[in-house]
Structure formats: structure tokens, C-alpha cells
Amino acid sequence: MRRTAGSALVGLVLLATAACSSETPEQNTEQACGAAEQLTVALDNFETTLTPDATVDEVRAAGSEVRQAWQDLDAAAGDVAEDRGQALDEAWEGLEQAVDDVRGETTVSEAADSIRDQAAEVREARDALADELGC
């Protein structure tokens, strides 16, 4: 019984930790910008290492630093792109709901402002995604 209670407690702690570790789009963007800066630093260090008296081990170590920085940026950029895609999905769902809400006696002119606002959100999300993709 004691083992089961302990396992349950560990499970709850892990669940709580996972729930608290989700990042916001702003945090993902900050992390990507920080990772981009780290890649710049790693590349600078790599270039500094390329001297006539550098050893193969030093060059490989500097190359490993660049590889890690690139991997960190690649992962962070993926999170940012995912956030932008999710924002587009959410904006689309809002527009779809606004159009679906036009029923019965409601006229298009009565619902136009709401629909127009939702369409603007879709355009804004699309633009943010296109900017991230370099379109």
C-alpha cells in the first residue's frame, strides 16, 4: 500500500511539473531569439578557432558547439512555427464559428462586423505565419 501511495505521489508531481512547463508563444519566440544569438556566438567562436596553430580537437570541439547551437535553434524555431500555425488554426475556427452563427433572422449586415473582425484575425495569423516562413 505504501508503494502505491508513493507511486501515485510521484505521478502527481510529474503531472504537475509537465503542466507547469508549457511555454507561451512569447516565451517560444524569446527562446528562439536567444538560440539564434547563441548560434552567432558559436559561429564566432568557431571562426576564431580556425587559426594556423589550432588543433584538430579544438576545431572539432568548436564544431560541436556550433552543431549544438544549431540544433537548439532548429528546435526553438519549430516551436515558433508551430505556435504560428496554431494561431492560424484558432483564428480560422473563430471565423468559421462567426459564419456559422449567422442563422435564421440574422442578416449578413448584422453579423458583418463580427465576421469582418474574425477574418482580420485570420489574415493577421496568416501574415505572421508567412513572415516566419519567409514568404
Image: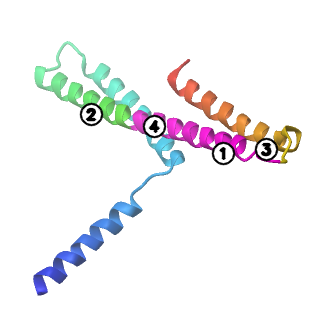
Percent x, y for residue 55? 13, 21
Horizontal side, residue 32 vs residue 121: left or right: left
Of the image marks 3 and 1, the number of the one nearer the N terminus: 1
In front: label 2 or label 1 = 1
Q: CA distance from mark 2 to mark 1?
A: 43 Å
Residue at which label 1 appears:
97
Residue at which label 4 appears:
82
Quarter of image, res 57: top left
Q: Residue at x 49, y 48 (%)?
A: 27
Q: CA distance from mark 3 to mark 1?
A: 10 Å
Query: Among all residues in the image, which is located at the extreme right?
Result: 109
Quarter of image, res 53: top left
Percent x, y for residue 120? 73, 35
Of the image marks 4 and 1, the number of the one nearer the N terminus: 4
Q: Residue 68 got which mark?
A: 2
Tally of numbered discs: 4
Determine the secondary structure under disc 2: helix
Percent x, y for residue 102? 76, 44
In front: label 4 or label 3 = 3
In front: label 2 or label 3 = 3
Residue at which label 3 appears:
114
Q: Are marks 4 and 1 in contact (CB under 8 Å)?
A: no
Q: Amino acid at mark 3?
A: Ser
Of the image marks 2 and 3, the number of the one nearer the N terminus: 2
